[in-house]
Image: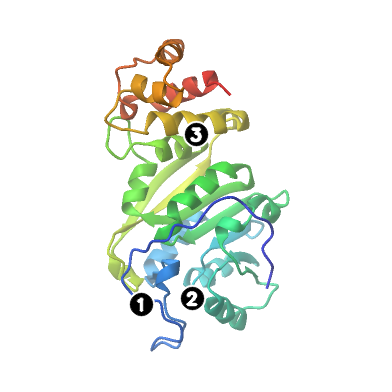
Amino acid sequence: MIHPPGKTSFRRRKQSSTQDEDVSGEDPSGSPRARRRFGQNFLTDAGAISRIVAALAPQPEDNVLEIGPGRGALTESLLAAVPTVAAVEIDRDLAALLRSRYTDDRLQLIETDVLDVAFDTLSLGRPLVIAGNLPYNISKPVAMKLVVERRAVSRAVLMFQREVAQRLTATVGTGAYGPLTVLAGRAYRIERLFDLPPGAFHPRPRVVSTVTRWTPREEDALPESLLSPLRSVLRAAFARRRQTLQKNLRAALGGSDAQAVALLAQAGIEGTLRAEAVAPEGFVALARLWPA
């Protein structure tokens, strides 16, 4: 077992998309059962696994990381393509199962929460090629982790709840468009590849899942110095979706209507608009002007 290689500030969300009991022990197949508190829904569809690996296109020289290997269905296919895979698994029973199947020189197992793993400690000059069937209860924090630690990522193929995938790829003016859309879209080109029904998993979730592919954008699309002010701008702009930008910015700026009007004018944005009507470039322009 590899110990956690660093800490980040992301937090796990205490929710689950299933209603299964959080039980230990084994199911009839002899494998550890899914745990509700970890939001586990194991991918069992062989065709879907093949499509995920094909979309990731791992090469023998790639530095492959799997998030949440579970019972190892996707792991097995990844190891057929590359000599070594690193995998982050929080469930001690599943980690023990994986250690019983694979030697350390093939599967480098990190037994911890992925939100506590610093990607740059794993990349070591070789950006990560990431795959994962993400537990629904940490999908949005993991998406933000990919944005913040994007310099350590070469590409990724990840599965999300369909509603989260819709937010990641939403267009301006739609209800799904929001801070996650802007931040992830500035850091990556995100493609929705295909949907998977509940029957592709065990236990069956109550939602449809979507497989997405993430390809990093150029550095100047989201400079490191812009990330923090952009997050602040988005937090302020979307604080009350039914309010206008001018009112939301005024509240964030301590009630200064004049400052809000001036910022919006400098950014070339109409203050009577709601946040969902502003393109990502508008928020970037605001972020460049945002007071420290």
Work out whether mark 1 precedes mark 2 in sequence or the reverse, and give the earlier one: 1
Q: Label 3, label 2: how many angstroms apart (C-alpha)?
A: 36 Å
Q: Residue 110 in the image: state x and y as whole percent.
A: 63, 67
| Dot in front, 1 or 2 | 1
Structure colour scheme: rainbow
Q: Residue 291 in the image: state x and y as whole percent.
A: 55, 21
| Dot in front, 3 or 2 | 3
Query: For the residue labelled by badge 3, is the local secondary structure a helix, a strand or a loop?
Result: helix
Q: Quadrant of the C terminus?
A: top right
Residue 14 shown left or right of residue 129 in the figure = left
Which picture quadrant has residue 166?
top left
Work out whether mark 3 precedes mark 2 in sequence or the reverse, and give the earlier one: 2
Residue under numbered circle 2? 71
Q: Are marks 3 and 2 in contact (CB under 8 Å)?
A: no
Q: Residue at x 69, y 69 (%)?
A: 2
- The type of residue carrying mark 3 is Arg
Indicate which disc residue 231 carries.
3
- The type of residue carrying mark 2 is Arg
Q: Residue at x 58, y 80 (%)?
A: 96
- The type of residue carrying mark 1 is Glu
Which picture quadrant has residue 235?
top left
Q: Residue 11 in the image: state x and y as whole percent.
A: 52, 54
Quick one: 291 or 75, which is closer to the camera?
Answer: 291
Q: Is residue 245 visible?
A: yes
Residue under numbered circle 1? 21
